[in-house]
Image (cartoon, grey):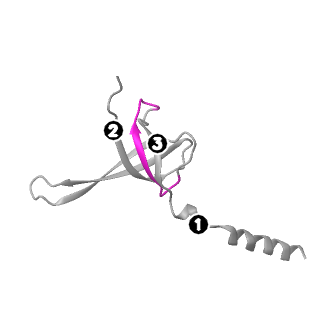
Amino acid sequence: MAKNKKIRIGTVVSDKMHKSILVEVERMQKHRIYGKRIRRVSKYNVHDENNDCVVGDNVSIIETRPISKTKRWRVLNINKKSEMNQQDLSPLTEENTLDSQAEGE
């Protein structure tokens, strides 16, 4: 019944589109003559229904029916969140509130 669908693991490089992300998938390939391993990169437009992914996230994507002209993949799950987005920003907000209170005096 269900066909085996391709699954890829990659890194989000752009999340500026609505409900879409750009995922870069890296693979290593052996040169056909010299045998040296070559890094190959493919970029996929991926459907992200809830806009959960941000730049730097490591995600799994799965092949799906065509969603638009270029989107044929959707997010299966987020393997690792970006470390930039997990930083605590509370010290910055405290500084901003202190600055605004000082200006009001």
Residue 75 shows which numbered tag? 3
Taking the spot 72% from the left edge, 68% from the top edge, the residue there is: 93
| Magenta residues, start to end | 54-68
Q: Main secondary structure of the magenta part?
A: loop
- Mark 1 vs mark 2, CA separation in Å: 33 Å
Task: List x then y, in percent, for residue 16.
Answer: 54, 49
- Residue for badge 2: 6
Taking the spot 53% from the left edge, 53% from the top edge, the residue there is: 54
Q: Quadrant of residue 94?
A: bottom right
- Mark 3 vs mark 2, CA separation in Å: 12 Å
Q: Give above or below for 29 relative to 69.
A: below
What amino acid is found at the position of numbered circle 3 in the picture?
A: Val
Task: List x then y, in percent, for residue 1.
Answer: 34, 22
Left or right: residue 92 versus residue 68 is right
Q: Quadrant of residue 35?
A: bottom left
Residue 45 sits inside the magenta stretch:
no
* Marks 3 and 2, the one that precedes in the sequence: 2
Task: List x then y, in percent, for residue 97.
Answer: 79, 70
Left or right: residue 64 versus residue 53 is left
Q: Give above or below for 54 relative to 86.
A: above
* Marks 1 and 2, the one that precedes in the sequence: 2
